[in-house]
């Protein structure tokens, strides 16, 4: 059974780093019924503390930038909540600079911002992070290449096939149509799935704008009958 | 069915966020039968991929490790016990330039008999099967991941 698939290809020449890293061989397809239900990695050794969900409270002072809340539900492809699954996020600071030592962009680091968070989804599949809106940053893919503001997400879900690493973008960002990484998704409806929406129900008045972004992981809870 | 959220690259800047304490040890406790696995991630010209993330998992074991400037990674693991087929580890590869992660398997070199009858290995063209089997190198196992080209590692679609 093949549902709508919005996945990007491995080779997308507009994103130059794919050229020497995309495999040339087709992946070997394992019969669905063999591994449909293969359990995913046990991520329980990855520490998740309550304070990991608030990226504005990890240092002595508060980070500069626009404080925001990002929340949403993690669902399986039957739209059922994925409970107690790990959500990891990482991002640039408000100036568009990562703490990562590999980032040499000439924008300031913020001593009050690391930009990494972890949380488990709750009984209804909800996650929630407090952070600051990341800045756009330049990269060397082509002349004047700038990434739209984005937050990186990593999720496990219940099975090996549900593992997902992706990026969340912000609505109305004029860099979005210019980005070779988001544009690698052939179908515009697939790209839309990575853009959060401004949500006044999530927004806390006089404190932080809220963004809502739901995530659908591959696979369903349905247990195959075959042993 | 709801469409799954599409994948995007892990990018180059995950190194400050995804590692965790003892992440390269696939099981928590000390275990006398733990094996060290070392490998290298290489691109289509044979150059090292210095910004990849590898996850190895099976049963109650899970390890996560980054590659260094030489594309080298290592983790320690116990050989999993399986009820049928050959023992193996699930290996997931993330990197800048990989818009979707890659899934492969690491089989063990001292399991010739079991490897010969494993139904997943049997699906793989015989000339490429060796890319899935680690090599014994003294006290350690070597398992390289070639993303593209000569000796390209076999990847699986789940
Ligand atoms: Fe990024």
Image (cartoon, rainbow, N blue to C red):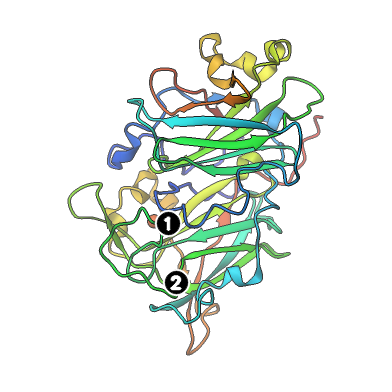
Q: CA distance from mark 2 to mark 1?
A: 29 Å
- Image quarter of residue A12: top left
Q: Is residue A114 above or below residue B158?
A: below
Residue drawn at x 38%, y 77% as measured from the top left: A65
Residue with the mark numbered 1: A192
Residue with the mark numbered 2: A113
Assess whether mark 1 and mark 2 are in contact (beta carbons under 8 angstroms): no
A128 horizontally vs A169: left or right: right
**Res. A194 in view:** no
Of circles 2 and 1, the one toward us is: 2
Q: Position of residue A82 (x, y in %)?
A: 68, 55
Label 1 lies in what chain?
Answer: A
Disc 1 element: helix
Residue drawn at x 46%, y 81% as measured from the top left: A62
Disc 2 element: loop
Residue located farthest toward the bottom when viewing the structure as drawn: A206
Quarter of the figure with the C terminus of chain B: top right
Q: Is residue A121 above or below residue A133?
A: above
Closer-to-camera residue (A103/B99): A103
Of labels 2 and 1, earlier in sequence is 2
Cβ of disc 2 within 8 Å of ligand 1? no
Q: Position of residue A166 (x, y in %)?
A: 48, 51
Count every numbered label the image shows and give the total.
2
Q: Quadrant of ligand 1?
A: bottom left
Label 2 lies in what chain?
Answer: A
Badge 2 and badge 1 both on one subunit: yes
Closer-to-camera residue (B124/A4): B124
**Res. B98 in view:** yes
Residue located farthest toward the left when viewing the structure as drawn: A143
Q: Position of residue B66 (x, y in %)?
A: 50, 43
């Amino acid at each position: 059974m093949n549902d709508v698939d919005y996945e990007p290809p491995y080779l997308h020449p507009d994103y130059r780093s794919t050229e020497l890293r995309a495999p040339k061989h087709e992946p070997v397809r394992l019969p669905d019924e063999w591994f449909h239900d293969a359990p995913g990695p046990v991520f329980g050794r990855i520490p998740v503390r309550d304070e990991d969900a608030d990226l504005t409270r990890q240092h002595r002072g508060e980070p500069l930038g626009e404080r925001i809340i990002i929340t949403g539900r993690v669902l399986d492809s039957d739209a059922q909540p994925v409970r107690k699954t790990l959500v990891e996020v990482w991002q640039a600071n408000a100036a568009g600079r990562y703490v990562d030592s590999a980032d040499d962009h000439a924008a300031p680091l913020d001593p009050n911002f690391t930009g990494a968070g972890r949380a488990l989804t709750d009984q209804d599949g909800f996650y929630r992070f407090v952070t600051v809106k990341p800045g756009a940053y330049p990269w060397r893919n082509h002349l004047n290449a700038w990434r739209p503001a984005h937050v990186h997400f990593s999720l496990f879900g219940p099975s090996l096939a549900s593992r997902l690493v992706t990026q969340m973008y912000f609505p109305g960002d004029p860099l979005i149509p210019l980005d070779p990484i988001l544009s690698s998704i052939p179908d515009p409806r697939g790209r839309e799935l990575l853009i959060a929406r401004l949500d006044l129900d999530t927004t806390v008045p006089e404190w932080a704008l809220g963004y809502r972004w739901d995530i659908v992981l591959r696979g369903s809870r349905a247990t195959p009958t075959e042993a | 069915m709801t469409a799954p959220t599409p994948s995007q690259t892990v990018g180059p800047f995950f190194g400050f966020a995804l590692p965790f304490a003892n992440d390269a040890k696939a099981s928590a406790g000390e275990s006398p039968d733990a094996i060290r696995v070392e490998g290298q991630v290489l691109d289509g010209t044979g150059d090292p991929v210095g910004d990849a993330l590898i996850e190895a998992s099976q049963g109650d074991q899970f390890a996560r490790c980054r590659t260094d400037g030489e594309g080298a990674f290592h983790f320690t693991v116990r050989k999993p016990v399986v009820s049928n087929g050959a023992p193996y580890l699930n290996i997931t590869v993330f990197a800048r330039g990989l818009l979707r992660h890659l899934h492969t398997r690491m089989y063990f070199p001292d399991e010739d008999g079991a490897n010969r009858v494993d139904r997943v290995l049997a699906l793989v063209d015989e000339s490429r099967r060796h890319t899935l089997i680690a090599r014994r190198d003294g006290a350690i196992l070597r398992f390289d991941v070639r993303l593209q080209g000569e000796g390209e590692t076999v990847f699986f679609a789940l």
